[in-house]
Image (cartoon, grey):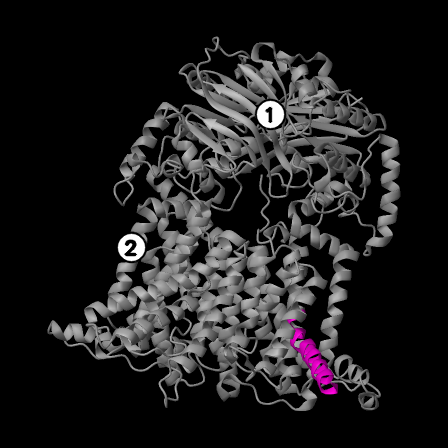
Amino acid sequence: MDDVWLQALSILSATLRMATPLVFAAMAGVFSERSGTIDIGLEGKMLAAAFASACVAVVTGSAWIALLGAVLVGVMMALLHGVACITYRGNQVVSGVAINIIAAGLTLVLGNAWFGRGGQTPDLTPDARFLPLRFPGWEEAASIPVIGPIYSFVIGGHNLLVYVAFLAVPLTWWVLYHTRFGLRLRAVGEDPKVVDTAGISVTWLRYRAVIIAGVLCGFAGSYLAIAQNAGFSPHMTAGRGFIALAAMVFGKWRPWPAMFACLLFGFLDAIAIRLQGVVLPGFGEVPVEAIQAMPYILTVVLLAGFVGRAMAPHALGQPYIKER
Amino acid sequence: MSATPQVALPRWIDIGLLPLINLVQALIVAGLVVLVIGVNPFDAMRIMAWGAVYDSVAISYTLYYATDFVFTGLAVAVAFHAGLFNIGGEGQAYIAGLGCTLVILLLDAYLPGILLIPLALLAAMAFGAGWALIPAYLQAYRGSHIVITTIMFNFIAASLMVYIGSDILRPPGDMLPSSREFGPSAHLPHMHDIAALLGISMPRTPLNLSILWAAACCVFVWVFIWRTRWGYAIRAVGLSPKAAVYAGISPQRVIMIAMCLSGALAAGVALNQIVGYHHRMLLDFVAGAGFTGIAVALMGRNHPIGIVLSAILFGALYQGGAELAFEIPTITRDMIVAMQGLVILFSGALAYMNRPWVARLYAMFDRRAVLAEAT
Amino acid sequence: MPAEHVGKAGSPSAASRPAAIELRGIDKSFGPVHANKNVNLTIAKGSIHGIIGENGAGKSTLMSILYGFYTADSGEILINGDPAKIHGSHDAIAAGIGMVHQHFMLVEPFTVLENVMLGAEGGAMLRAGAGKARAELERLARDYGLNVDVNAHISDLPVGEQQRVEILKALFRHCDILILDEPTGVLTPQETDQLFQILRALNARGVTIVLITHKLREILAITDTVSVMRGGEMVATLPTRQATREQLAELMVGRKVRLELDKTEARPGDVRLSVRDVTVVDGKGVTRVDKVGFDLRAGEILGIAGVSGNGQSELLEALSGIRPLSSGGIKLCDLEVSSNDPSGPAEVREHGLAHVPEDRLRLGVVTSFPAWESFVLGYHEDDEYNGRILMDREAMTNACGKLMERFDVRPRNPDLRCGNFSGGNQQKLILAREIARQPKVLVVGQPTRGVDIGAIEFIHRQLLALRDAGCAILLVSVELDEIMSLSDRILVMFQGRIVGEVDGDEADERTLGLMMANAHVQTDEAA
């Protein structure tokens, strides 16, 4: 009984860790898409940021400077997206795809040129990473039956960025619904012309939204490379940007539901590892590949079943052109 | 009556000069990256260009790669004409490989090549089309965004193929997750074999008959899109879905047809790689050709002629990139991937960046031309 | 050659205090289109100033320049006597200018309060500003009778109330000059009267009002001064008291207009289109067309009048097979259509129904197709244009060229992109395509929207000729003049229902207007 309980708690704890990069990226998507700019490029921004954080961490040995570097790179990629989509009114999906492919190529080229190792960065020292935090009294608490492990392993025991991710959700919600910036942001995603005639700059508003998305992708990438893992490895985002995008769509472009969708995908990821080698009666051993494909299959199923187009911000994907 | 920046430019600027400018821009950025690595970009450029054309072997390799890109470029273009962005060429080509492999594994002991290979191609096309059809159906009838679903289907295809390759098709005792080697009747003739039959000597390269299939596909796509009523319907839906409905065209059906065709075209990669060269199903045989197709289609302005030209260009980049990676090991072939991304960026996402100044420049020269005529 | 008229344009106001707005030499081109040519205009403080002109005369462009939406190529703007640099809407708002746009500038999923606050939030946090905004809105509601539920979502409000929100937005920003661009296009005559009452109340408290319209009746009803625009030029400014209907009409058009068409008595024949209890429910579950029934006979024009958005568009779409019926039935010649047995646009077209759609640019043509390709839209599967596999390009281009000749489409170039034709010529191209095959039934929506006067006459004559040739025509239009001058019978639609039928000869604006507001039987809600 106790064993099952601990097992469940450990899955819950893993769910939070798996969901963290998704939550960051999904919030990035909420900001960008609520302002009317499609963000297929979450994946690429995250990947580039992960690479940047690992590189900076290797060179400086400081996790904080590495995080800063990742945010910087995330913002630069976001600005590229902004220039293409906002200033030059290009196709937003095409721009996102370009960013993904550029990131995939450049991280490998630069990684190989700088470190050899087939695109991997050298292993990081503990100082250069965000390590799990030990909350006061966690050891004592762990020995308290039933409730104790909740404090020690589910609430506590994660690295700093996990907490930041879950704080980013109420923050996003508060910004969107309780500030002037949020009101304007939501308005520009629905009808940029209204915002323009209200005397507000559509361009600057949208740029701010994609920059925030870049910052959040910087956090997501840092988490992957210098918190969850001890370095960058090729294609390490492995489609998480797209899954986050799907979570955001499934959450109907709202912060809280998007977070729950991320948790769902994180949960799948967490149980996937534990399902390996499990024999289902009447089916045989579950193939690893099926479990790995689960998030993608589930995304398709969810998108097919539950989300109507009417939910999207009205001006999503349409560049703003002043016209008669 | 509109104030859009769309000034009518002569066709040679639209389909010739602008893509060329995009390419130069992408090359400049790539050159900067090379510079950051600490290599002289002009040296790199020279090695690449030379590596792509220095002898008939290099040229054959360039064409061999280009063959793949024609297939995926056409696949992206056909979907584009229907207003769809098919990012799933990679997965469709991959699953198509499964289709032809299954047919060949079943029948290579019984059928001669002349029957077996067309059958294998048909199976590849059916599988590729089938894999494209699910996202198409979901877009047409369930409203799920085809960009996201085709991306997801790439991942699902990858998992599925790893499973099939390592757990089902792998011969016992073999370490590689791949199928057994095909029988000789399933080998698509190489171009050097064909040339030898005609008494011409050509070096042994992977270039095979698939290139003729690619040429046939180009002609077919051109005729289909611009000369038939089905192509008319596809373009109408792509340009103005509401007008298409008014005209009695069903956008749902058009989405299904266009994606089906798109997947079937992407299946050409399986012909070139599996039936034409490897003669067994390998993991990852598509190797990113599906994504290259996006760059090829954008640069080729979704027209078969443009697609052939830009496919050859990317073929040359691949071949030259291999030479470059060999000569300067600090630059890996992934540079080509970055290059594709840059081409997609400049010719797709930043398409309106160059147009205004090119138009202004043109207007300047044009006015002069008009004046010259008047005097 | 604009003639010199009474009160030459731009003559300085006789009033001693500075004008609210003075425009000097405003010039604006969009590519080859010269939208405003050296426009001078003076609007006296505290006046109600009307600007009238046809569609495309340059009124909206001029006001957009004043509101900072476009920047003029040359010219000066003076507000209250001071030169003003207006580079964007924020400059206009700061100068005290408010604007009620033709298409409301409201965020549909937002509440009234959020819409009013947008751009004038009063601080970085919403909470503080919201309280003040509520109080201010209450005050405005008291002072001007502008009652709206501040917590309602815009998408739930009727258009009349949405327009009130637009006015509230301007007042909330303390505007003392209010511009209204075609404010009555979506209103019933009764709602229009209400709007005018509000405008008079505002004017009485010192707000200068600029009313842009193409309706003579409104100019005469409310303005003090009227300016007339034609072809991008300001051709006259005169006190409304001195203006007559005929004079203004002539100034607008530039020549004497023939208000009546030569129309012979209709000779209705057999029933071609029979509509029974047709109901259409849209995707959101709203009933758009509610048990509509009528018969349409050969050789008659049946007009459907109504304020736009009362189900006419959905009815047209249902008749032409674009939208499925929710219940009821349609009998088109020998084709039966019902909700169980739907027919798409292709099938309906095959049975002799031609359709000139309301939304010309999005439905009628594919703007990036060349003219000949748009010309076969809907008929692209015809044997005439197709071989076994390939389409017959020559046949299509020839057919297109021939009809461009007959319908006087200019420029007469089948290879030109559709988007490069003017509205009138696009409409003629569509009309040519739909009429060419001698349809048994023609349904037409807004045939002259955004079309120049010359083309309007041409289109009207074509429709009458078609009727006389025995075609059954259903005409939907929001232009009452058009409905009254063409129709043999008129049905009025209100909230998806047919609320009245009037004989073409007996129709007058007032009766139809009351019917359009559904007030002819009930007590007058407007009172």
Instruction: Give the residue displayed 65% in from the left and 45% down from the top.
Output: A193
Q: Secondary structure at mark 2?
A: helix
Percent x, y of residue C64: 65, 37
On what subunit does the disc labeled 1 rest? C
Q: Amino acid at mark 2?
A: Phe
Which segment is the magenta one? A1-24
Q: Is there any visible trace of residue B200 in the rendered image?
A: no
User: Is mark 2 in CB contact (under 8 Å) with mark 1?
Assistant: no
**Mark 1, residues whose alpha carbon is within 10 Å: few (<14), some, or many (≥20)?**
some
What residue would you read off at disc 2?
B220
On what subunit does the disc labeled 2 rest? B
What residue would you read off at disc 1?
C478
Q: Secondary structure at mark 1?
A: loop
In front here: C29 or C454?
A: C454
Instruction: Give the residue displayed 70% in from the left and 47% down from the top.
Output: C109
**Mark 2, residues whose alpha carbon is within 10 Å: few (<14), some, or many (≥20)?**
few
Q: Amino acid at mark 1?
A: Val
